[in-house]
Amino acid sequence: MDIGELIRELRTAHGWSQARLADEINARHGTTLTREYVARWERGKVAPRGFYLAALSGVLDVPLAVLEDPMMRRTFLTDVAGTAIAPVIASDLLAKGFAARLTGGPSAEAWEAKLAAYGSDYMSMGAADIQRRVAGELVVIQAQLEQPRLWSAAARLMTLYAKTFPGSDGSAAVRWYRMAAQAADESGDQATRVWVRGRAAIALGYEGASLGVADILADQAIALSDKPSLGLLNAIYGKAHAAALRGDRAAALALDDRGRRVFDSAGSHEQTSDYAVPWWRLNVFRSLLLARLGEEHAATDAQNQALAELPESLPRFATHLQLHQGLMLARSGDRTGGITHATTAMNALPPEKHSLTLRMLMEEIQA
């Protein structure tokens, strides 16, 4: 393992962004390290030496010898991380949970505000940056679930937490999506029950993972209510992607047509929240769907529609669209060109903006 990879793994284990790691070093050592320089370390463009190795040792709680010795780096994460990092994280989570139980925890209104903030954060930050934060929130809200209204907030937090795991692992993400659906049922709130299932379905369908579960959750959402809503919209497109990946072209196109009609009634004005589906995001869903179906002209039109309104603050989604183009090239027979196009797009996006979903799209293109 090279030192850049170890720094990234340790930073992620602490739940820190690259900017947070730079800030921690600056605060303790009076330096002016930038996020960009941390990114260069992690990408192997430059290696930290001397002073910065010692600073990293102190900030990341790792012996200096491990940072200096390639052989020790190779085994450190598997041999030591379980005892050096996990108890620290577990201690923090336990403390938050008991503190919430003793003090009563945040109000329902405060939880709604937290959900809104996390919805925005997820769109601009990677999964690793918020996974630990959301885990802490789940421990806290778990101590408050004698209040029925908080089951709704918990279900939506659980759905977001599930999205920080790759759906292709067949266990973690699916387990959390299923529990989120059960939590939504406990809330008794119909809108939450539909939304949680729909969001899980589009997440799995878009990733091309656990398609059977995506179908089940989508069907449950559709059966609960055919009233136009964001939950129904997500469910329809989750089911459409599953159909496309199975080769059921007619079903996928019919679902796309139905989804566009639902969007006309239920589309979002909010532009930068994971809980919203504005026009540009609908076209991100459609861009990949149509690329998977080989509908090149329609897919290109959807990409142009998305780019026309995509906020500049969300460059990760522009990369999604570039990967959709790479997929179209690969499916048209130019596999090398598709992989090259997608790889170039990924390399242009700062590593801390990468997501599990982007990596899974790369695997689909390469396959």
Image (cartoon, grey):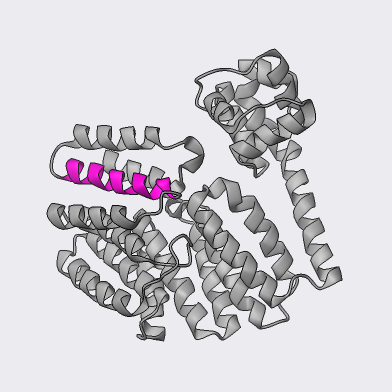
The location of residue 271, given as percent across then percent down, is: 43, 62
Among the 4 quarters of the image, the one containing residue 28: top right
Q: Would residue 133 appear left or right of 177 to someone viewing this image?
A: right
Provide residue 82's location: percent of width, then percent of height.
Answer: 70, 39
- Nearest the camera: 249 or 32? 32
Q: Residue furthest right?
A: 102
Residue displayed at 37% across by 37% down: 346
100 up-or-down from 186: above or below: above
Residue 304 in the image: state x and y as whole percent. Answer: 24, 53
In the rendered image, residue 32, in percent from the top left (x then y), is placed at: 68, 26
Task: Name the residue nearer the viewer: 282 or 67.
Answer: 282
Q: Answer whether residue 240 is magenta in the image.
A: no
Q: How many marks?
A: 0
Q: Range of the magenta residues?
A: 314-331
**Whether residue 161 is visible:** yes
Query: Which quadrant would the C terminus be assigned to in this image?
Result: top left
Q: Main secondary structure of the magenta part?
A: helix
- Is 16 or 214 nearer to us in this picture? 16
Quarter of the picture holding the N terminus: top right
